[in-house]
Image (tube, helix red, strand yellow):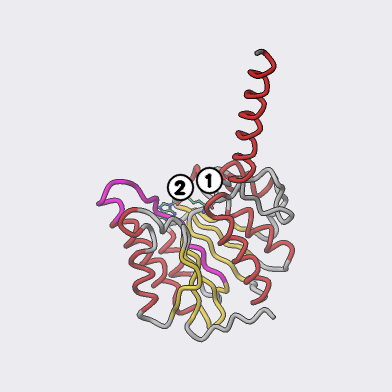
Amino acid sequence: MINGIIAILLVGLFGFFLGKFIKHKSLYPFMHFKYDFRKRRDTFKQCLELLDYTNAKTIIETGTSREGLRGAKSNGAATIVFGKWAKMNGAKLYSVDISEESVNNSQAEVDRQHLHDVVSVFQSDSVAFLVDFDQQVDFLYLDSYDYSDDVEVQKKSQEHHLAEFKAIEDQLHENSLVLIDDCDLPNGGKGKLAIAYMLQNGWRIVTEAYQVLLVRDDFVIDKA
Ligand SMILES: C[S@@+](CC[C@H](N)C(=O)[O-])C[C@H]1O[C@@H](n2cnc3c(N)ncnc32)[C@H](O)[C@@H]1O
């Protein structure tokens, strides 16, 4: 009897940890296995490969990693993921955020990860920052104005991400990559208006998931 109970408990425990292991989506070996990027793992991985392929040098992220690497599962920790790629590949990442607290937290993680020479974190409204940015951009990651259940907030977030794209579109080129976060959400997520605009203006979707990855119509993905 006791043995039977112990066997059931062990099987249950095994199932629990197996389930956790299957759900765990790491970017190992690029990032430590313990970081779980969950719904963003596959699109991050694809972007990292395309950054290699396009030999990107200038990356912009709107909305910085306010929880540092602790936020891998919740927010993405993109500042650190793409900052690390930048460090390994002689590129620069510019991350902009309107909140002093987000900027301070992100900067602290950038310093802890020894990325301060390649990652610059700016405190500004992202649209104002992008309007003033005067270099060509190889990879644009849009992830600022938080989305919510409130329909008015959703509209503002979507309008803000469209305004971000319009503010920098002249600095994008034929091999630029654009990734938009938090898209697979009620009423279209952060990217709804930006994606509609991009599709009418020479861009196409490469991957449509929780994040949406877009390139120019004439971008040729040939990694063979
Ligand atoms: C989801 S978090 C960004 C997460 C980050 N990209 C990551 O991968 O960890 C969204 C951030 O956008 C910032 N934000 C909201 N409105 C903004 C605006 N108008 N301009 C710039 N940043 C803004 C917030 O302060 C917040 O820190």
Q: Which residue shows up at 55% across the image and 43% down it?
A: 67
Q: Is mark 2 within 8 Å of ligand 1?
A: yes
Q: Which residue shows up at 68% across the image and 63% down it?
A: 86
Q: Position of residue 137 (x, y in %)?
A: 55, 73
Identify the mark at residue 66; answer none if there is no mark: 1
Residue 150 painted magenta: yes
Q: Which residue is mark 2?
A: 99
The mark that comes first in sequence, 2 or 1, is 1
**CB under 8 Å between callouts 2 and 1?**
yes
Q: Which residues are magenta?
A: 139-154
Q: Which residue shows up at 41% across the image and 57% down it?
A: 184
User: What's under tag 1, amino acid-wise?
Assistant: Arg
Q: Is mark 1 within 8 Å of ligand 1?
A: yes
Q: Quadrant of residue 14?
A: top right
User: What's under tag 2, amino acid-wise?
Assistant: Ser
Q: Which residue shows up at 35% across the image and 80% down it?
A: 200
